[in-house]
Amino acid sequence: MQELFLVTGATRGIGLEIRKALLAQNKAVLSLSRSAETGMQAFGELDFRMGFDLTSTADNPGRVLEWLQGKNFSIKGLVNNAGLLLNRPADQISVEEMQQMWLVNVLGAMRLTQGILPFLAAGSHVLNIGSMGGFQGSRKYQGLSGYSASKAALANLTECWAEEWAERGVRVNCLALGAVGTDMLSTAFPGYTAPLSSTEMGGYIARFLLEGHRFYNGQILPVTLYNPD
């Protein structure tokens, strides 16, 4: 039975590069994204795609499990990579905008992970993609209170999940990323040049997904070129 890795938000940016890096190592990848069934380029026979809206309760994680029926795959890993970043001053961000970010960055990841948990065997790896903005004690930036708070919640969930699912043998970690050159970052901060490309970061995350859970569990790990203080 071949191992299968799920990646959310894999149509562009870091998610796309994670997907490509895994495929380059002959790993089967199921990409979950709202646009996965409409014009998303395929990169080979092991590159599978499913339209999936993390913000909608109408999209049930059970669809992923239905897709698996009759296929010779076992879920080995999940990357909760999909994210939403809005640059809004803390005194101007609306409840609706905050809800949008939490639906994608926290609740969507929670719902999907809960849904596939019964099919994660011992030795599998759930990897949450966090942010230095959500890393406790790190320097914070203006305009990112909503985004940072959601990523802090995801980091805390990582620690809770690792404890709750330890007896299953499912390991859970979170990479708190610094600035990476993506369309999402460019939209939020026009003109800013990040020190790392999405290709570099995607490759690193793919490697950590495959090997990191041998060394870490329940950890929030900074991935940044700058001192988190």
Image (tube, rainbow, N blue to C red):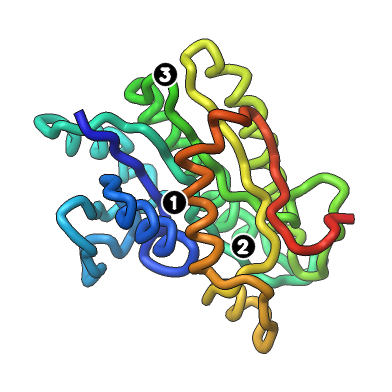
Measured from the top left, where is residue 140 in percent x and y?
83, 61
Q: Amino acid at mark 3?
A: Ala
Residue 113 vs 136, above or below: the answer is: above
Residue labelled with disc 3: 122
Residue 170 left/right relative to 48: right
Q: Residues within 10 Å of mark 2 (few under 14, many from 20)?
A: some
Looking at the picture, how far across and down is residue 76, in whole percent?
36, 32
Q: Earlier in the sequence, mark 3 or mark 2?
A: 2
Residue 181: % across, % down: 59, 74
Number of marks in picture: 3
Label 2: element kind: helix
Mark 2 in CB contact with mark 1 (< 8 angstroms): no
Q: Residues within 10 Å of mark 1 (few under 14, many from 20)?
A: many
Q: Nearer the viewer, mark 3 or mark 1?
A: 3
Q: Which residue type does callout 1 highlight?
A: Thr
88, 210: nearer the viewer: 210
Q: Mark 3–mark 1 contact, CB under 8 Å?
A: no
Quadrant the C terminus occupies: bottom right
Residue for badge 2: 97
Image height of 109 relative to 146, above or below? above
Q: CA distance from mark 3 to mark 2?
A: 38 Å
Judging from the image, what secondary structure is the residue with disc 1 in?
A: loop
The image quadrant where one finds the N terminus is: top left
- Residue 125 position in % (x across, y down): 47, 32
Q: Is residue 48 left or right of residue 187?
A: left
